[in-house]
Image (tube, rainbow, N blue to C red):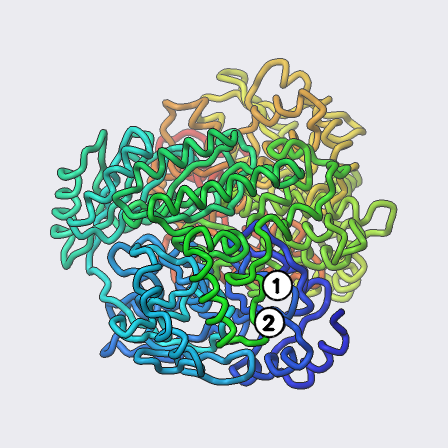
Amino acid sequence: MTDLSGLEAELRGVVRGEVGFDVTARALVTMDASNYRRVPAGVVAPRDAEDVAAVLEVCRARGVPVVARGGGTSIAGQATGTGVVLDFTRHMNGLLELDPATRTAVVQPGLVLDRLQEAAAPHGLRFGPDPSTHSRCTLGGMIGNNSCGSHSVAWGTTADSVRELSVITARGQRLRPGRDWAGAPDGLRALVEADLARLRTGFPDLPRRISGYALDALLPEKGADVARSFCGSEGTLGILTEAVVGLVEAPRARALAVLAYGDESGAAEAAAGLLPLGPLTVEGMSADLVRSPAGLPGGGAWLFVETGGQTPAETRARAEAIVRAADVVDSLVVTDPAAQRTLWRIREDASGTATRMPDGSEAWPGWEDCAVPPTRLGPYLRDFRALLAAHGLRGTPYGHFGDGCIHVRIDFDLLTEAGVGRFRRFSEELADLVVAHGGSLSGEHGDGQARAELLPRMYGEETVRLFERAKAIWDPDDLLNPGMLVRPAPLDSDLRFSVLPRRPVDVTFGYPADGGDFGAAVRRCVGVAKCRTTTAAGSAVMCPSFRATGEEEHSTRGRARLLHEMLAGELVTTGWRSTEVRDALDLCLSCKGCRSDCPVGVDMATYKAEFLHHHYEGRRRPAAHYTMGWLPVWLRWVARTRTAALLNRLASVRLLARLGKRLGGIAPERQIPRIAKEPFTHWWRRRQRRTAGDLVVLWPDTFTEHLSPSVGQAAVRVLEAAGLRVVLPPSRPLGGGVCCGLTYVSTGQLDRARAVLRRTLDLMEPVLRRGAPVVVLEPSCAAALRGDLPELLHDDPRAPRLASSILTFAEALERHAPDWTPPAVDRPVAGQTHCHQHAILGDTADRSLRESAGLTGELSGGCCGLAGNFGFEKGHFEVSKACAQEQLLPSVRGVAEGTLILADGFSCRTQLEQLAGVRGRHLAEVLAEGLEKESKVSGVSGVEK
């Protein structure tokens, strides 16, 4: 039994980097992206090679294993371990040198691949291999797994790009592996030279042979390349601290030919025949993995074939030649870089979407990336499909068809003893099938625990014993990542599902996509870590708190890991009362970005609300939950007592404002928004009403009602100008009006949210009977009604009816006034699409409406950082500000004169005003102003006052 406290104290005494033996630090690395789970003793984030050497010395003396970890996206279990985990992403993540003349770079193991690509791009260079996890995988992990990616048909595997390594062995020896036996540990050369015949004949000749140790790279005719043989060793031979890698010339122009086939077999049969034409990629996927086929040519499966050249014309000609050579049912050639990126994202997201069957049921890795000779891919896939059917399993293959490498997630039942038994039997039979086709058990992600047990079926017992002797030369104490590659743990042990409760836990949300099971919802996170990207691409939102902090604890994956451990009860032992889970969720903005941007649809905002509900059940809550959580109540009382002006004056007194914020749990840096003197519904009741036109119900959300009634007034003006008859929902004089429950949901007051929503459904009965559309101006409220309402009131048939009637302002005009022409505003715009709009509602109608009004320019993605109550809560200001500085604030800096700043969300407009001194406006306000200008020109009276 390891003395954890003694080990921690000794490590703290010799390591300059962080040493984490607390529950959170350990829980975050119990899993990678595989089916496996191991609880580590602790985690160390070394600052340099000296720290690594110090950790190895302490662990060697105590007999504690050491596991090197990069981005934690390994799919075979090799980034988990029971000893000390080395996290290289925090400090040892630098690009130390880039030499365009020699086309080399010196990197540390924690450097994310995209950072290297960004640095190399200005020189016309790039690193050849590019896994789909390129935005978060690290060079160290790529070397450990010998990663490949979509361009391997042109530029090979990571091993093909490695020139020299800096390695520390478990016994502290510092080596510089390279060619001609450089950096070889004592005894390795003798081992190889004693078994040359086996090394020359016992390894399949494949472009994607990743399984086992690459001992054949040490043959004299292959340059006795110790660095190359180290690649793919999964951290079992030595700890990498630095690497010299080669770069390749990036094509000046690219074209993408998307070739459509009737099914995956047709695509697989065609792939090898395209290789003589020199493509950069030959990637395959079937329709089952595509959420939306928009933009793809018609077919049941596709090959993504990229070509490169010096000019767009040259690349297009090459792509068109490939189309002519291919026997396709349809095709598409794309040269626009933005359009290519959109298509590539469909392929890259397959690593996540493949974790769900078309019917929504779960699918898992384990046989993720077998590889066969490309010419054998078609027959192999047919046999593979037959084997799946024989075991009653389903899976959707995709991947690197040009290299004969297939990725697939299979709907294994890993929760029951019978299902795990079938998993083992299928694994053994598939290993035999792969070998029969001359293939490799792993073609990209390594063996880890998932396949290492079956290596004798591929290599034979003698070659596997040779692997064991090689491991003993590098690591005689079996200290480094034990249980991987040699003397492996059984492939059906340490499964991460075995620790979860067998019965669904009692929860409040319905989790309809997960069969009502909160554990199944948490299992959605398979660890592909798209949430760990350090920059938000395009309109993407997820995960703003990780980008602001850089901490795994504040990523969607990190929070999911802690929730998993909470359900397991081994590390996190206090269940819903866990302070570790609470603290990790504290910086979740509830932006809903993960619901749309996560390939498997993790919805951390819902999980956070669920957790807070249970965590504070029967206990005192933070002050902000009472002030901002009950905001609709307080603002209604202000309206009834007509005290808005008084409260605004009191809030302008610095001392009183400071006291109020302190008592209310509000960040002292924040200004308290001014309450409107006249609520929107008061204005509505005293105005003249139109009676003609199709009926729409305008929802008076709390923000529009009490804080920005001008938005509601503008919306009425525009909707009526479009020929619609606007009414408000029914209300009760003393019982209040309708409410979406958003503030109660975001603070985890779910009992109150359910009560409020049931009252709302009661009030909306006449509207539901009539089937009238309901227009909601505030995106977060619309998202709550469309998403949270039916999941919270999953037992009320009225909930989905109301949810389906919810429309945004732009959607209402598009669907119910399709012939209306908006005013010609003809102005450039900047600003941000609301995160909830991006995640839940979509902005297609908004884009169309803006275009019709002559509003040009793109809105940024990301999250404003205020996110309802989040940015107002004490302790959140700095993270809130950092989120705003990522995309929102830059989007409005230095804009051209006359540019309109659009921000439909009250939070977004408040953040702009408080951090940038800029006034953002709702699209309805902009269009209403356009109508007023038109009416003045035509002599018609303007907007009603």
- Image coords of residue 190 (percent x, y): 39, 79
* SS category of the residue bearing label 2: strand
Is residue 431 shown left or right of residue 806?
A: left
Disc tally is: 2
Of callouts 2 and 1, which one flags the residue occurring earlier in the amino acid sequence?
2
Q: Position of residue 807 (x, y in %)?
A: 53, 29
In the image, farthest residue toward the top: 769
Location of residue 914 by image quarter = bottom right
Q: Are marks 2 and 1 in contact (CB under 8 Å)?
A: yes
Tell which of 796 and 243 is nearer to you. 243
**Gap between marks 2 and 1 measured at Cα:** 8 Å
Q: Residue at x 53, y 36 (%)?
A: 411
Position of residue 593 in the picture relative to residue 816 (left or right): right
Residue 95 position within the rendered picture, expressed as x and y whole percent measured from the top left: 40, 75
Rendered-image quadrant of the N terminus: bottom right
Examine the rendering and report whether any part of residue 837 can be seen. Answer: no
Res. 287 image quadrant = top left
**In which quadrant will I find the C terminus?**
top right
To which residue does mark 1 refer?
81
Seen in the image, is 182 located left or right of residue 367? Answer: left
Above-or-below relation of 82 to 907: below
In screen coordinates, is 647 left or right of 49? right
Judging depth in this view, the residue of 499 and 812 nearest the camera is 499
Q: Residues within 10 Å of mark 2 (few under 14, many from 20)?
A: many
**Nearest the camera: 812 or 119?**
119
- In terms of secondary structure, where does tag 1 sit? loop
Q: Which residue is mark 2?
A: 66
